[in-house]
Image (spheres, rainbow, N blue to C red):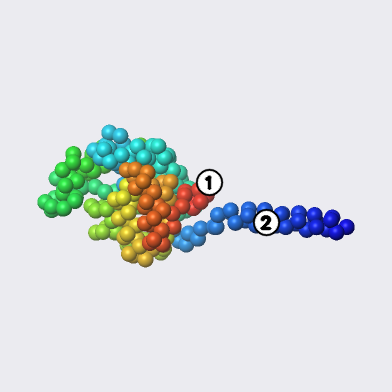
């Protein structure tokens, strides 16, 4: 009888440990608050192999990691959940009259004059075209909040959480995350829907830098479902 009792108790303990482990492995539900999905700079000059900024390598990272497909899926899932979709575009007028003859942006515009409005390079990558009902924000710098109406739209909709997707991780995505943190939004970066020039650079931002700013780094499925 004692042996049987010990076996029974042992089996109960093992079952409890297995159940506890299974529960521990289940991802915690993400509190989205009142969110908006932000899609940053998915234009040909950055995301296409023939774009003016193709040497940066974002297009290759995006293709290798399925980033562009994941962005499209994030948009689809957000729309199904009635989450506002905000499209942000880095564009310049021809000749970039609002950029002084100094600094990073002046140097960048000398590299083939990328992201000029009304050109193929500034158009969305195929499959990521804007749709009716999506809010459009045009910016001139990395930070999507800088000299734009983005915050006005967010405040009008009482948005408190930003789901960040797009390109490039180290430039406009990073700049926008800084702006979002500075404006006290809750930020969730969907890393499988963000592309950059290289795996090491993306990994550093995803695992080291952004979490230090209280940015939650997760996936499209974990945030929006399947």
**Residue plotted at (38% across, 61% down):** 213
**Of the pair 84 and 52, the residue shown nearer to us:** 52
Q: What residue sits right under mark 1 in the picture? A: 226
Q: Whole-percent x and y of residue 100?
A: 13, 53
Q: SS at mark 1?
A: loop
Task: Please state which of residues 213 and 167 is positioned toward the viewer in this rendering.
Answer: 213
Percent position of residue 103, x then y: 16, 53
Query: Label 2, on which residue?
Result: 17
Mark 1 surroundings within 10 Å by alpha-carbon count, few (fewer than 14), some (14 through 19), many (20 or more): few
Residue 115 location, quadrant: top left
Residue that lies at the very extreme toward the bottom in this rendered image: 184
Q: Earlier in the sequence, mark 1 or mark 2?
A: 2
Mark 1 or 2: in front is 2
Q: Residue at x 26, y 59 (%)?
A: 146
* Image point (41%, 53%), residue name: 207
Residue extending farthest left: 101
Res. 25 visible in picture: yes
Mark 2 secondary-structure assignment = helix
Q: Is residue 181 above or below residue 59?
A: below
């Amino acid at each position: 009888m004692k042996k049987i009792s010990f076996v029974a108790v042992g089996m109960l303990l093992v079952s409890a440990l297995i159940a506890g482990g299974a529960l521990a492995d289940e991802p915690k539900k993400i509190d989205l608050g009142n969110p908006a999905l932000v899609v940053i700079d998915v234009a040909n000059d950055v995301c296409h192999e023939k774009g003016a900024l193709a040497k940066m390598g974002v297009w290759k990272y995006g293709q290798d990691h399925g980033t562009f497909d994941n962005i499209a899926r994030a948009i689809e899932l957000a729309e199904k959940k009635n989450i506002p979709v905000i499209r942000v575009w880095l564009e310049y007028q021809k000749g970039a009259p609002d950029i002084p003859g100094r600094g990073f942006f002046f140097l960048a515009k000398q590299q083939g004059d990328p992201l000029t409005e009304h050109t193929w390079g500034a158009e969305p990558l195929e499959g990521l075209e804007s749709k009716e009902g999506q809010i459009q924000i045009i910016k001139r710098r990395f930070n999507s909040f800088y000299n734009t109406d983005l915050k006005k739209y967010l405040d009008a909709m009482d948005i408190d959480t930003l789901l960040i997707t797009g390109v490039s991780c180290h430039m406009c995505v990073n700049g926008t995350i800084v702006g979002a943190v500075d404006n006290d939004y809750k930020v969730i970066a969907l890393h499988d829907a963000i592309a950059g020039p290289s795996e090491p650079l993306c990994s550093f931002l995803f695992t080291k830098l952004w979490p230090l700013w209280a940015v939650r780094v997760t996936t499209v499925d974990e945030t929006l479902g399947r």
